[in-house]
Amino acid sequence: MTIAPALPIPATMRAMVQGDGDQAAIQEVPVPKLDEGDVLVKVDYASLNPTDWKHVAWLSPKGAVIGCDYTGTVVATTSHPRVHLKVGDRVAGWVHGGMYPDRGSYAEYLHIPADLCWKVPDNVTPQQAGAYGVPYCTAFHGLVHSQKGAWPPTKLNKWILIYGGSSSVGLYALQLAKLMGYKTITTCSPHNNDLVKSYGADEIVDYANPAAHLKIKEITGGGVDVAMDCISDAKTQAFCVDCFGDKGGQLNLTLQADPEVEKKRTDVKLVFTLLYTLFGKDISLAPRGQKNLIPAIPQERDFFAELCAKTPEYISVFGIRPPPLEERQGLDVITAAFEEMKAGKISGKRIVFKIGA
C-alpha cells in the first residue's frame, strides 16, 4: 500500500533515457510506481560516474533511465516492515541506473527499497550527499567486504596500495584504508599530491615514473600486502601485481581481471568488485542485445543494507567525506560531461548535477 504524499506528484518527469544504439536523450517519461518496501525520491542532485556513460555506450537497453548516484527527498512511501523512512526525509545512495525504465538518477524522481538508501546527516549538504554513491560503496565493498578488512577501525602493520588515488573511488579508499589502520601508498599525477595526502595517503608515487613499482617496493620494504586498483585496465593491473611482496595478497579491481595478468603471479588474487550484485537481484552486464546472467547473491544485499544503515554514523563519527565537488546545472549538461570524462579531463573532483528545482 502506498502512503499518500504530502505534496502532489506529477504523472510524468524529465529523465535521461537510452535511445537507439549508443545514444541517450532527455525525454518526458512516467514517474515511477512504487514496489512494496520502496520509497519514492524527488531527486535534488545526481553525480557523474564512468559507469554512466559506459552503460549508454554499450549496455543499456532502449528505454532505460541513466544515472546511478543521487540525493533527494522522500515524497511517498509504502507500508512494509523495512520502511523506516517518512515523507520529508533527506536520503542518498545509488541505483543500478541504465538498466531499468524507472530507477535511474538522471531523472526528477526515482524509487528505491527503503533499506538500500541512507538518511543524510544534518551537517551534510545536498551536493555532498549526492557525491557518495558508487565510489563510496566500491571502496567499502572492496576493502571491507571482499578483502574482509578489519572494521570498525583498528591498527594494522600492513601496507596497502591504492592505485589511482585521485579518482573518486581512490579518495574514498584512501580515507577508509587510513581509518582501517593501513599504511597507505598511492599513485597519482604530481599535481594531485596535496589532494591525496589530505585524504589519507602516507606515501605518493608518480605513476608515470618508469621505475614506479620499484619505488613502491623500496618504500614498503619489499612490497605491499593488499591493493585496490581504481583504474583497472590491463596495464594498471599488471603494475599493481608487480608491487606485492613475496607473500602475495589480494588485489581488488573496479573492472574485470585481465586473463594474462592473472597468470603473472598465482599468489596474488585478483578480485573484480562488481557493485551491482549489492541489490540482490539477477543482473546481466553483457553488451547490448546479449545475455550474461549473473545470479543474485543474497549476502551481498545484506552487506549493502547494513552499510546504508551505518553510513550516517560513518560520516558523522569517522568523518568520511566526498571528493572536491564541481556543481553543474540540470539534466541537459550531462551528455557534455560524459565526453569530458571519456577524454580524461575530469580528475581529482566529482561532478554533481542539480536536478530538482
Image (tube, rainbow, N blue to C red):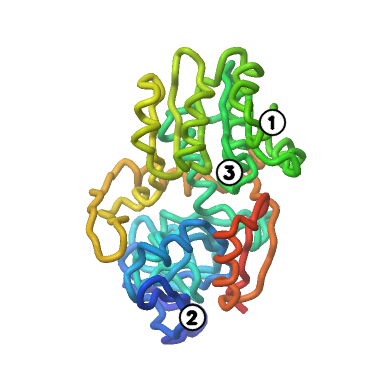
Describe residue 288's horizontal placement relative to residue 192 as left or right. left
Residue type at the position of mark 1? Ile
Q: Which residue is drawn at 38% across and 45% down?
A: 274
Residue 221 point in image, percent of width and height: 61, 13
Q: Residue at x 51, y 37 (%)?
A: 236
Q: Is residue 180 above or below residue 305?
A: above
Residue 123 point in image, percent of width and height: 69, 54
Which residue has dot 3 on it?
Answer: 313
Q: Distance between the residues labelled 2 and 3?
A: 36 Å
Describe residue 9's horizontal placement relative to residue 125 as left or right. left
User: Which sits earlier in the primary sequence, circle 1 or circle 2?
Assistant: 2
Residue 187 point in image, percent of width and height: 63, 35
Circle 1 residues within 10 Å: few <14, some 14–19, many ≥20: many
Find residue 204 and name its label: 1
Residue 299 point in image, percent of width and height: 31, 41
Q: Is mark 2 on a helix, strand or loop?
A: strand
Q: How far apart are marks 1 and 2 (CA)?
A: 42 Å
Q: Is residue 231 above or below residue 228?
A: below
Q: Is residue 84 above or below residue 274?
A: below
Q: In which quarter of the image is the N terminus?
A: bottom left
Q: What element carries label 1?
A: strand
Find residue 26 and name its label: 2
Label 2–label 3 contact, CB within 8 A = no
Circle 3 residues within 10 Å: few <14, some 14–19, many ≥20: few
Q: Is residue 85 visible?
A: no
